[in-house]
Image (cartoon, coloured by chain):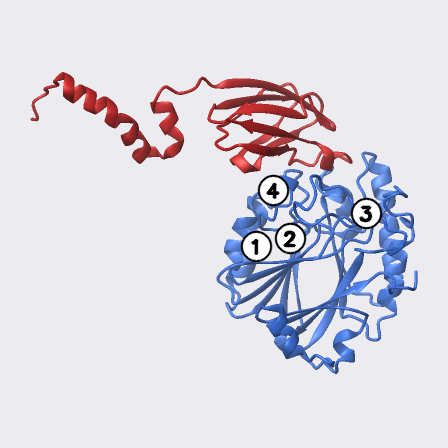
Amino acid sequence: MGMDRRQFMRLAGIGGVVFASGLPGWARAQGYGTSADEFFFVQLSDLHWGFSDAKVNPDFDGTLKKAIVAVNALSEQPDFVVFTGDLTHNTDDPRERRRRLGQVKEMAAALKVKNLKFMPGEHDAALDNGKAFEEFFGKTYYAFDHKGVHFIALDNVSDPAAALGEEQLRWLAADLAARDRKAPIVVFAHRPLFDLLPQWDWATRDGAKAIDLLMPFANPTVFYGHIHQENHHTTGHIAHHSAKSLMFPLPAPLSQPKRAPLPWDPSEPYRGLGFREVELEQKGVKVAIQELPVVKPGAA
Amino acid sequence: MTPVTSSLRERRRAMLALPLAALLAVGGGYLVTARAAPKERVIKLTVKRFEYSQKEIVLKRGQPVVIEITSLDVPHGFSVPDFNARADVVLPGKVTRVRFTPDRDGTFAYLCDIFCGTGHEQLEGHFVVRG
């Protein structure tokens, strides 16, 4: 039975947000074509390039490439692709860190869409305060506008204590000060801005200050990574959506004693890995999220 | 001026009222202190990449503890989210003190919340609290 978008919204139970899981092109296949003020972007997260434990992911050097092929195969191309951190897996060797960051940049260049937004994760940036990341990708936090939507990329990882810091918070306050309170705002971060699970270090020390700054706005939405799984949470009227990883999934909060990677399942390769499309309608007031697999089920 | 008189009964009443006054004034955490407070237990801990010197520490419910922790290599974190206790940073060669009173039984994690390298996610331990 078909299900239109309005039905999906009711099922999701969160006003203005649609969740769906399935195959690429869902939104457009349902006839939700893009008009001038509707567009979509793709979120890729937690690539952990350089991770090499074959027991956790035997295709550790192929999963990202497959994801890039999958994005390129979308029936319509996104307006941009955002990488929400942990592009690389941590290394103590600064030269190796740069090599991995360079390889990610090179692989990302194979995407058809050339409007790419990169953000660091703690694996990329915490050991050198974002120095190597900046050499390859520029600033670790920034803002941009796209078709009437204001996007803000926050850095809660370059400080190894996982804090935004007063300087960045002042910048955020200044960025938001002049904006219409009804203006749609999309925030990207690597770590959750709220205390999802501090016992597993799934939090940002001063994330509540950023949420306080966003609270007066009617339509903020946050997309983040770090926890290697889909999670949907609201703080007040602000929705927070975490993305899957492209290297290994992590367990649901407190579903097991430790936050160890979930084992690879040979009967269902790439399970728990994936990326997402985010479609913004009515200039960002409505958000539709479509979770997509790295490899179509049965095709691995 | 109010005359200062203190019969034995009044002094007893005042002594009994003190813990309640302390509770009302500054919150429940000081109630134990105002009464015969259990002695604070000192626990010495070291941390290095990627282990704490103790993976499990047994605590007595209601007894205040101070964790005296020192890093043996790089800056680390020490956080006990369930008791809202946290060090800003644990530096090499310096003693950092974290105080809290475990007020309920159970198993409670402590972890490093300052990214310290590839094994950071495994740098953790837990308290077992018993009555």
Residue A89 in sight from this viewpoint: yes
Q: Residue at x 37, y 28 (%)?
A: B30
Q: Position of residue A273 (x, y in %)?
A: 80, 56
Specify the amino acid type for callout 2.
Leu
Mark sitting on residue A154: 2
Judging by the rendered image, the residue that carries numbered circle 1 is A172
Mark 1 secondary-structure assignment? helix
Kindly indicate whether the residues beneath marks 2 and 1 are on one polypeptide chain. Answer: yes
Position of the N terminus of chain A, as image quadrant, is: bottom right
Q: CA distance from mark 4 to mark 2?
A: 19 Å
Disc 1 and disc 3: Cα gap in Å? 28 Å
Do tag 2 and tag 1 residues touch (Cβ < 8 Å)?
yes
Quadrant of the rendering where the C terminus of chain A is positioned? bottom right
Camera-nearest label, 3 or 2? 3
Q: Which chain appears blue?
A: A
Given the image, on which type of amino acid does mark 3 rest? His
